[in-house]
Amino acid sequence: MADNSKTEDTASDSLEAAKNATNKKEKLADQVMQNPQVLASLQERLDNPSLTPSSYIETFPKAVIRRIDALKKLQVKCAHIEAKFYEEVHDLERKYAALYQPLFDKRREFINGEAEPTDAESEWHSENEDEEKLAGDLKNAVVIDEKAEETNVKGIPDFWFTIFRNVDMLSELVQEYDEPILKHLQDIKVKFSEPGQPMSFSLEFHFGPNDYFSNSVLTKTYKMKSEPDKTDPFSFEGPEIVDCEGCTIDWKKGKNVTVKTIKKKQKHKGRGTVRTITKQVPNDSFFNFFSPIKVSGDGESLDEDSEFTLAADFEIGHFFRERIVPRAVLYFTGEAIEDDDNFEEDEEGEEEELEGEEEGEEEEDAESDPKV
């Protein structure tokens, strides 16, 4: 029993000694960090461009690194709170989409000639009101058969097709043989995923009867992720599109613009005879938008071209959702495009102005330096 008591006392003394040693080290580290010379040395290392952030952090005492690790853990918790924030934003988007929809439904009716706006609904005071009044006076001076004109024009002709032509991001996708089909486009809607479902949104393209396909609606669904990556939580910057799904287009015979038929000659190796075969190959078309590249679910990476194509697809889907659908009339008239262009020009102007100021400062420094 006496031996056991001595062993316990020895273990207790060792543990106490270890704690004291640790406390002394931490106090010493704190004292070191309060030393002006040490701080100056660290600042010198920070100012050294050859040092990477990780390399100079490694020079800190263990007590400081421990605190930095604690900050990182707090940062991860912040990222998870931010993810919850974006989930609630998505819920708000769904809520307000329901409030916007009656207005969008009326927009569709006016575009497709299903209803006529009242005088109150069509009253609009523009910035160029005086010019428009003058144009109206000139128009009234000319004899126009208004009844015949009203009979021939229904709604707003080629509304969505005009938007496709006006927006560079979309016009680049549209081929000449796509144009007659897009003239049948009657509406584009955005639908958000239901509560409790994985975050996503769908684009619905509503078409009138046409000679090309039997579908009345073509859909594209974008799946989103709004949670920090377990392996890289600090990269989280909000929801991102991670995959998308298109739909099957029921093309009428001979009307599929996403493929073309080519003739190819084949020569028999033994007999030397030649035969001509026909085969279908992919064809450039906006309607390939509904047959997107599938993100591999087994972790295999896509090649560079596929990644670029998928990124462009995600950007287009986001643009439809955030800009085209909510502000369609402004993209039809071109006003939204002018605003976008002006914003880009202002950014470039500011950048050039800043560069000029920097150059001016360098010149002043050179002139004031007596060594020059």
Image (cartoon, helix red, strand yellow):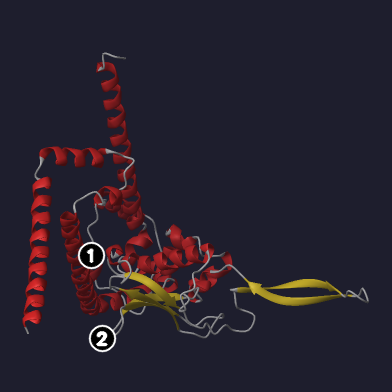
- As drawn, is 182 to the left or to the right of 124? right
At which x and y percent is residue 221?
Answer: 40, 78
Element on which disc 1 rests: loop
- As drawn, is 270 to the left or to the right of 245? right
How packed mark 2 is, by other alpha carbons closer than 10 Å (few <14, some 14-19, many 20 or more), is: few
- For marks 2 and 1 on the same chain, the one whose residue lies earlier in the sequence: 1
* Mark 1 lies on residue: 123
Q: Residue 196 shows which numbered tag?
A: 2
Q: Give the amino acid type for the residue marked by disc 1 in the picture.
A: Glu
Q: Give the amino acid type for the residue marked by disc 2 in the picture.
A: Gly
Asked whether residue 140 is in view, the answer is: no
In this rendered view, identify the residue nearer to me: 70 or 33: 33
At which x and y percent is residue 133?
Answer: 27, 53
Above or below, 309 against 132 in this view is below
Q: Residue 330 shows which numbered tag?
A: none
| Residue at 18% over, 60% down | 66
Element on which disc 2 rests: loop
